[in-house]
Amino acid sequence: MYIIDIGIGTIPSMTFRIYRVLRATAVAFHTDSVPTSYLEFTKCTCAMQRLVNYEPQGFEEIVYTVTNHGGSVAVVMDSLLDSEIVKPYLDAIYQASNENHTMIYRVVGGVSPIQVALELLLMNKEDKVSYRRDNMIIRVIATREKLQLRDYIKAYVLLMGNEGLLFREYYQGGVDDFNGIRAYIIYAKA
């Protein structure tokens, strides 16, 4: 079984490894944050299924059946947006993998918003980068200002201080006494 993190999720950011894994997969489960164009680009002959259409137990049974017959299964997701959604499904696999011996591989997609934010922090550069993924916009903003975000789906803050790197989920009105440069990763509707 492959867990594929699409990162930015644009077709140009797809790595050859992701392309190859999806082409060889029998069933590709995906979250709603993954654009269907991203999956269709591979011209995969696999069955593409929305993950949330299945219960974790039913998902585990499908994974076991496919992998037991020599096939592979992929879970295609955005790790920053979908970690809570995917967790019960992965927990079902981890619990059953002791009995079923399912091998799990993680595949990280091309460019991650965290990579972009980290590069801006390391350059100590205030800048903005924006990516469009279907009906979603992913913004990375490196600034010394404390932003007050509105109308976002999910947001994270990456800080580099004396103690090292700190990555946390953004929440409105949070107490923040950090005065250096920070990078915001913001998911918003287009």
Image (tube, rainbow, N blue to C red):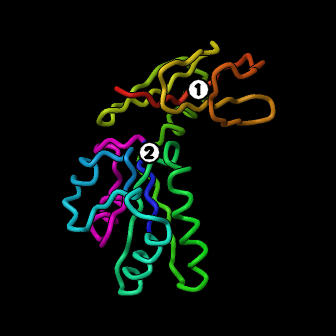
What kind of residue is marked 1? Ala
In the rendered image, the vertical position of residue 190 relative to residue 179, given as above or below: below
What kind of residue is marked 2? Gly
Residue 74 locus on image (x, y percent): 39, 65
Residue at the image position 61 percent from the left and 74 percent from the top? 95
Q: Element under label 2?
A: loop
The magenta segment is 8-29
- Does residue 180 show up magenta in the picture? no
Residue 25 locus on image (x, y percent): 31, 70
In the rendered image, the vertical position of residue 72 relative to residue 133, given as above or below: below
Residue at the image position 41 percent from the left and 63 percent from the top? 54
> Looking at the image, which is closer to me, 74 or 19?
74
Badge 1: residue crowd in 10 Å (few <14, some 14–19, many ≥20): many
> Disc 2 designates what residue?
7
Q: Is residue 128 left or right of residue 94?
A: left
Q: Is residue 160 left or right of residue 34?
A: right
Residue 24 locus on image (x, y percent): 29, 71
> Disc 1 designates what residue?
183
